[in-house]
Image: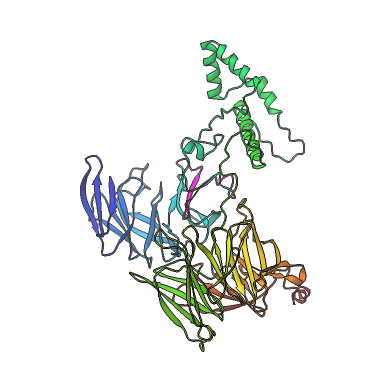
Amino acid sequence: MLATGCKDQHVRLFDLDCMSLKSVIYRSTLDITHLAFSPNGKWISIGTDDGEVKLICIKDTTRTIALEGHSNTIKFVAFHPKDNIVVSSSTDGTLRIWRLNYAKNAAHDNKVSKIPSDMVDSAESVKVMRDLISRPTAGINDLGYITWHPSGSHFATRGRRQEVVVVQNGTWNIMYKLITPDPASVLQYSPNGMYLLTVGVKEHFCIWRPEVDREVPITNEKFAIPATEKAIPAELPHPVTGQEKKIVKQLQKTDFEQSKTDRRNNTTDSNMATYNNYADNEEIDEEEYEEMCDFVVDDDGAGYLEDLKRPSDALRYKERSRATALSELQLGGLSCYNQPILGSTFSNEIQAAFQSGSTAELNNKRYLAFNLIGVVSSLKSDVHWTVNVEFHDKSQRPFHFTDHYGYTMSALNESGAVFACQATSSTPSTIFFRPLDNWPSKDEWTVQLAIKESALAVALTKMGIVVATDLGYLRYFSYGGSQIGIQSLAGPILTMAGHAKYLFIAYHSSGAFHGNQSVSFILMDAEKRKTIHRDNLPISPASTLEWVGFSDTMIPLTYDTKGILRGMFLHQDASWVPLLDTDVVRGTKQDHYWALGVVGSQFMCIICKNDKTPQFPKPIINELPLQVPFCQFNLTSTQMEES
């Protein structure tokens, strides 16, 4: 049987045996957002835009149960595989646990009594989990997947940030979290429950083995879904049967291996059958078993040698150790074995270039720039965009204009505003500058890059405009619109920022390794186009850069997704000092801090309650005192040291 929810707000049932429409079982006043059958197929759950979940009995569609409590669109509904429990999620950020109740006079087969039968007549909410799951975020297609472990002991869903949370059945406590390369859009346990599949919004395909390793997935691919036999390494259990697959690969085609093959070819059919039976059943004789038991000796008492209770354990342990050794060899650069190792690093994907202070489009609105000077926002209509520029200093007159290019980034300072967009199939990458009213030259200008080149980041300095492109170029323009210089970067641009005569550039120096970005920076005197300092840029482990800028005293600053604000002090040998850990400030709250800059000893930011980026209408700016993360900060001596 197949159920469909269509744009006409109708839910239809189709009989797949005869490929025909069976019935229309539900008509909603709002859009249908999710459908799910109960494990035995007797009930169907229907989620809608009004925040209500309807349970409808397939056998008698007049029997319905309403699950009421969500205040916004339903994202997902999941039935427990073996019990009368339902979990639902909503865009209001809540996850609700429901228990289905049976009629008092209902008689059930003991074997299926806990699976929702025809006799369910009501439901009750047993748990509301607030701020556990994500809310709608610009540029992220979050389907709100909930997947139960086949045993029913726990379920997994995407958390508020870049993690998957696993919740225990009954206690409803979080058992653990898996940090994914990008926010997970789809999750699914394997039939035997040994593996968890996550597919990210940026098409990262990961397979986890949570009971063994919760830090690194066994498979991590992007843009391509590998075949099953490649997705799970051969030495690991099968995702359906759970049986271990035998590794039958040659390390090298040596004379020894060739001679062994020749001997096998010369054996009789009877002997070959015996050999095949040995390989299939992983049986070894007692002498070989004792020999293999000694191939690893726990001579330091560390306890890393597993107990081998039967001969097959010895062979299995040996093969697993061999596979681990091959993985380590290949990670070290030895590829002579020509054996691909999938998921050997957490993520080799470098962070995409971004414009500090800009956000992705959400509900046809976006911020192109948000800093301590003002705000540049863009509103999309049917045929064009409208760009609005306003200032925190109300004596400065705001302005707006019609945007026919679809600008995605901007930089704003006391001289004016620069806008840019990447190339599309129909339009080249465009740079547009508009001076402020108090600037001597009021001539605005537009420059279009070559078809093969796109702007990725823009910055304003005292001397003019700087544009970083996907060809690795830095293009310098005067405020009058003339290109006055060009240079190449040593790696792909990540982001940049300008202030007064200074230009700060962050770029990738190599690929990411184990989730850690390799980023370098250049601090330049834009007036002289001279490098002041260049070095590696410190970023928190397994994080990405979120913002770069300057303080009011022209100290270069960075802020990463772990919530660490750092400043570079040239008088301290250009060392980077952590100035604030916002995770400490946040505590148990789920707030996110959107960086704007530093004024005096205050971190200027926007506190995002339910999202990672500021939303509309324009939020207020908050101040947080800088607090270097010293140990035992409450001690008087520590506070004196910080001051």
Quadrant of the drawing holding the C terminus = bottom right
Q: Is residue 252 above or below residue 56?
A: above
Could you say which is closer to the camera, residue 366 or residue 85?
366
Task: Tell me which colouring the rendered structure shows.
Answer: rainbow
Q: Is residue 564 visible?
A: no
Q: Is 36 covered by the magenta stretch?
A: no
Q: Position of residue 591 (x, y in %)?
A: 54, 69
Q: Is residue 610 above or below residue 156?
A: below
Residue at x 38% of width, y 48% of height: 114
Q: Is residue 575 visible?
A: yes
Q: What's drawn in magenta, residue-wise?
A: 191-215
Magenta residues, dominant SS class: loop
* Numbered-mark total: 0
Could you say which is closer to the camera, residue 416 or residue 27?
416
Which residue lies most toward the bottom here? 395
Could you say which is closer to the camera, residue 388 or residue 452?
452
Quadrant of the drawing holding the N terminus = top left
Q: Position of residue 122 (x, y in %)?
A: 32, 58
Q: Position of residue 474 (x, y in %)?
A: 59, 64
Residue at x 65% of width, y 20% of height: 255
Q: Position of residue 347 (x, y in %)?
A: 57, 50
